[in-house]
Image (spheres, grey):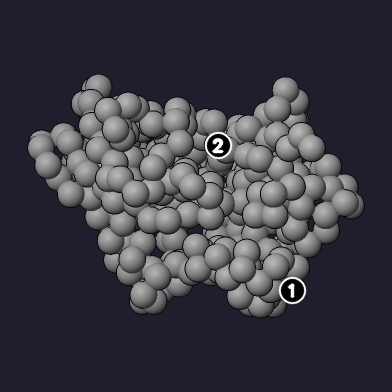
Amino acid sequence: MTEALDDLLDLLDLERIEQDIFRGQSRSALVPRVFGGQVAAQALVAAGRTVLDDRHAHSLHAYFLRPGDPGAPIVYTVDRIRDGRSFTTRRVVAVQHGQPIFHLSASFQTYEEGLEHQAAMPPAPAPETLPTAGEILPRHLPAPVAERLIEARAAVDLRYADAPPWAGAGQPRAPRSQVWFRTNGKLADDPLLHVCLATYVSDMTLLDSVLLAHGRGGWAVGDVVGASLDHAMWFHRPFRADEWLLYDQESPSSSGGRGLGQARIYTQDGRLAISVIQEGVVRVPRG
């Protein structure tokens, strides 16, 4: 396990301060606010720690309410909405400086047999044939920006199947992108941990597909201003976040200063593991 992954796991290992109240720390980000994937993952950890071990997360729906302060702890309060025979529902509110910054609803289910079908996995190059972030970022971004991005994503091996937005600024193309990802090290067998790590990564690149349609260079170069507004995930089948996952992303719409991204995440052997939808603020700075 790499030091960066160890630090990320520490970040997700929340402190329980009351039966249903947890406290999490933050780390510095590329922008002066807490990374949204971190808050979503920590909130899901808090919810999962109040659920029986035989119930696994199958969906989450979240709203980002205020920017998080990376210099202050975040308190997560869990509301036990329902404990049914098959499903368990939890609501989590993340609070900083006395104000809610994030709201999550998550549902958990016991294992059941049922009807099976899925969308086919799209074609994609093998992850081993693609450059790492450490190889591709310095080619297209100023050295300080590339170094910060590499450091921020060091816990995850994330590989672009196509040129990312900042590699083709000024050249609009189809609003679709693919990335492969896995953690930079092996994880324990806890299913909740793998779901939370996938939640963390899911906020990294999904809105990039909005930028591709307009030839914009991206968040890291000041070409646009963006922030997540809401985020939803459905966990269909078991997966491991320390094995390659294909994040197939597209944007069906952008308007009103907002952009919508939707995606499917597949295991390397073609099983549809997760569906994701996110809307975010996407604004062009006024000169």
Residue 29: x and y, percent? 48, 54
Residue 172: x and y, percent? 87, 47
Instruction: Give neighbour class at mark 2: few <14, some 14-19, many 20+ (Cα, 10 Å).
Output: many
Residue type at mark 1: give it. Answer: Arg
Residue positioned 79% across, 37% down in the render: 287
Residue position for label 2:
228
Where is 152 relative to 130, above or below?
Answer: above
Residue 214: x and y, percent? 83, 42
Q: Quadrant of residue 123?
A: bottom right
Most extreme residue toward the left, as rendered?
Answer: 18
Where is 239 relative to 69, above or below?
Answer: below
Residue positioned 45% across, 72% down in the render: 184
Residue position for label 1:
139
Residue positioned 53% across, 49% down in the render: 31
Residue positioned 57% across, 38% down in the render: 227
Q: From the viewer's perspective, is 226 left or right of 253? A: left
Secondary structure category for the residue under label 1 = helix
Alpha carbons under labels 2 and 1: distance apart: 27 Å
Residue 195: x and y, percent? 39, 50
